[in-house]
Image (tube, helix red, strand yellow):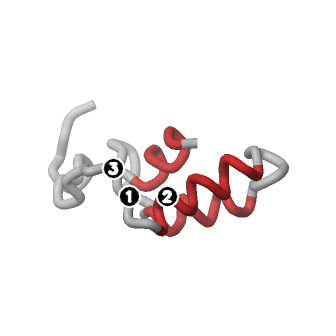
């Protein structure tokens, strides 16, 4: 679950970050079908309690022109 949320919320070389809200919306929509409902509930609760991945959101490899 953490990998899904981290991958969606952080920038990639091929796209900007979608953001934590979009990532949490995705896992919530897939709760009980694509993703285990208890795991989704726990993950959302952890983020609502203030958890973050600790990444520097100012660093954007797309904007900064990083090579692949």
- Apparent side of residue 36 relative to residue 27 in the rendered image (left or right): right
- Spatial separation of the CA atoms under disc 1 and disc 2: 6 Å
- Apparent side of residue 39 relative to residue 21 in the rendered image (left or right): right
**Image height of 24 relative to 2, above or below:** below
Residue placed under numbered mark 2 in the picture: 46
Labels 1 & 2 near each other (Cβ < 8 A)? yes
Graded by Cα atoms within 10 Å as few (under 14), some (14 to 19) or many (20 or more), the crowding at tag 1 reads few
Does dot 1 land on a helix, a strand or a loop? loop
Q: In the drawing, what numbered circle is on residue 53? A: 3
Q: Nearer the viewer, residue 22 or 62?
A: 22
Q: Earlier in the sequence, mark 1 or mark 2?
A: 2
Graded by Cα atoms within 10 Å as few (under 14), some (14 to 19) or many (20 or more), the crowding at tag 3 reads few
- Residue shown at 54%/59% (left/top)? 23
**Image height of 22 relative to 15, above or below:** below
Q: Earlier in the sequence, mark 3 or mark 2?
A: 2
Labels 3 & 2 near each other (Cβ < 8 A)? no
Q: Position of residue 42 (x, y in %)?
A: 61, 54
Residue placed under numbered mark 1 in the picture: 51
Q: Position of residue 38 (x, y in %)?
A: 73, 50
Residue 25's quadrant in the figure?
bottom right
Does dot 3 land on a helix, a strand or a loop? loop
Does dot 2 land on a helix, a strand or a loop? helix
Q: Nearer the viewer, residue 22 or 66?
A: 22
Q: Nearer the viewer, residue 46 or 24?
A: 46
- Apparent side of residue 33 relative to residue 26 in the rendered image (left or right): right
- Residue shown at 64%/59% (left/top)? 26
Most extreme residue toward the top, as rendered? 68
- Spatial separation of the CA atoms under disc 3 and disc 1: 7 Å
Quarter of the image for the C terminus: give it: top left
């Amino acid at each position: 679950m953490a990998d899904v949320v981290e991958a969606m919320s952080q920038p990639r070389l091929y796209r900007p970050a979608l953001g934590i809200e979009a990532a949490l919306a995705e896992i919530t929509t897939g709760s009980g079908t694509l993703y285990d409902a208890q795991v989704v509930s726990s993950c959302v609760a952890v983020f609502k309690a203030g958890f973050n991945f600790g990444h520097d959101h100012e660093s954007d490899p797309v904007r900064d022109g990083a090579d692949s």
